[in-house]
């Protein structure tokens, strides 16, 4: 199926030493390239200074506060993205604090855009973080797509080299989610254009 090209930012949410997130992100970024409908940009939060002390003024009043340089560089990449996929583990039945802080440092960059998720962790497979992220992005006027990919007890899925033991079902789940993201991203690009020219 031919696709027009849209910009997809893939965000690696965990930042701790020894994290597994980049393995999942590498697999997903390859899937996103293979889909063919997106220019893919991977944003790794481990490379970014994300202060926990947020700006003094709330984002609805000052949506673009001064940010540390490494954060500001990612802000520009969020601003040009049409869609996002967040790669997240569960930390204590929710998302990593690094990811929450990164989201909270931004506002208009999420507005009227679409978001998908890839989760991984122990028994819960990232689904508890994903449910919280749906609430968070709803507050930011972003649309989260129904389909997702989840890897509960991820060593059962990935071998020691970081390759999927049985890729067929996860690859199909990723492509189905990417199709939904592409549909929503196309619709929202058109809707934002109408709003901008009104
Ligand atoms: C602080 C912390 C809390 C965790 N809480 C959960 C949890 O609630 N549910 C779960 O299934 N796994 C949990 N885990 C296991 C992680 O999902 C697993 O270690 C995963 O590798 C973390 O992602 P990362 O390696 O990219 O940091 C937790 C791990 C950490 C470090």
Image (cartoon, helix red, strand yellow):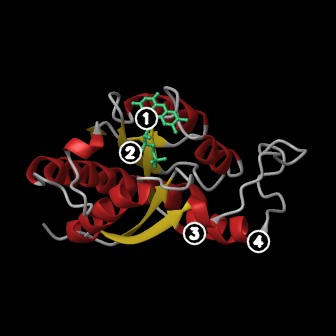
Disc ID at residue 101: none
In three-dimensional space, the C-alpha distance between marks 4 and 3, rounded to whole angstroms, equals: 13 Å
Quarter containing the N terminus: bottom left
Q: Nearer the viewer, residue 30 or 188?
A: 30
Report the mark closest to the observer, 3 or 1.
1
Q: Circle 4 — which element?
A: helix
- Within 8 Å: ligand 1 and the Cβ of disc 2? no
Q: Give the residue at mark 2.
A: 117
Q: Circle 2 — which element?
A: strand
In three-dimensional space, the C-alpha distance between marks 4 and 1, rounded to whole angstroms, equals: 28 Å
Q: Residues within 10 Å of mark 4 (few under 14, many from 20)?
A: few
Total marks placed: 4
In three-dimensional space, the C-alpha distance between marks 2 and 1, rounded to whole angstroms, equals: 7 Å
- Which of disc 2 and disc 3 is earlier in sequence? 3
Disc ID at residue 69: 4
Residue at x 20%, y 49% (from the top left corner): 176
- Within 8 Å: ligand 1 and the Cβ of disc 1? no
In three-dimensional space, the C-alpha distance between marks 4 and 2, rounded to whole angstroms, equals: 27 Å
Residue at x 58%, y 49% (from the top left corner): 111
Asked if the residues shown at circle 4 and circle 3 are in contact, with their CB atoms under 8 angstroms apart, the answer is: no
Q: Residues within 10 Å of mark 2 (few under 14, many from 20)?
A: many
Asked if the residues shown at circle 2 and circle 1 are in contact, with their CB atoms under 8 angstroms apart, the answer is: yes
Among all residues in the image, which is located at the extreme right?
A: 56
- Which of disc 1 and disc 4 is earlier in sequence? 4
Q: Is residue 97 left or right of residue 10?
A: right
Quarter containing the C terminus: bottom right
- Which of disc 1 and disc 2 is earlier in sequence? 2
Q: Circle 3 — which element?
A: helix
Q: Is residue 69 left or right of residue 162?
A: right
């Amino acid at each position: 199926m031919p696709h027009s090209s849209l910009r997809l930012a893939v965000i690696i949410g965990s930042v701790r030493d020894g994290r597994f997130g980049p393995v999942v992100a590498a697999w997903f970024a390859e899937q996103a390239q293979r889909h063919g409908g997106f220019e893919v940009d991977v944003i790794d939060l481990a490379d970014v200074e994300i202060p926990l002390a947020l700006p003094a003024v709330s984002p609805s009043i000052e949506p673009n506060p001064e940010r540390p340089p490494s954060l500001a560089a990612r802000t520009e990449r969020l601003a040009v993205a049409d869609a996002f996929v967040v790669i997240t583990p569960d930390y204590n039945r929710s998302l990593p604090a690094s990811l929450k802080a990164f989201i909270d440092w931004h506002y208009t960059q999420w507005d009227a855009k679409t978001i998908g998720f890839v989760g991984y962790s122990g028994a819960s497979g990232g689904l508890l973080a994903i449910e919280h992220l749906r609430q968070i992005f709803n507050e930011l006027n972003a649309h989260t797509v129904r389909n997702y990919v989840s890897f509960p007890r991820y060593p059962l899925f990935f071998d020691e080299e970081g390759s999927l033991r049985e890729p067929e079902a996860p690859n199909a789940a990723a492509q189905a989610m990417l199709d939904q993201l592409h549909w929503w991203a196309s619709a929202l690009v058109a809707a934002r254009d109408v709003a901008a020219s009104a």
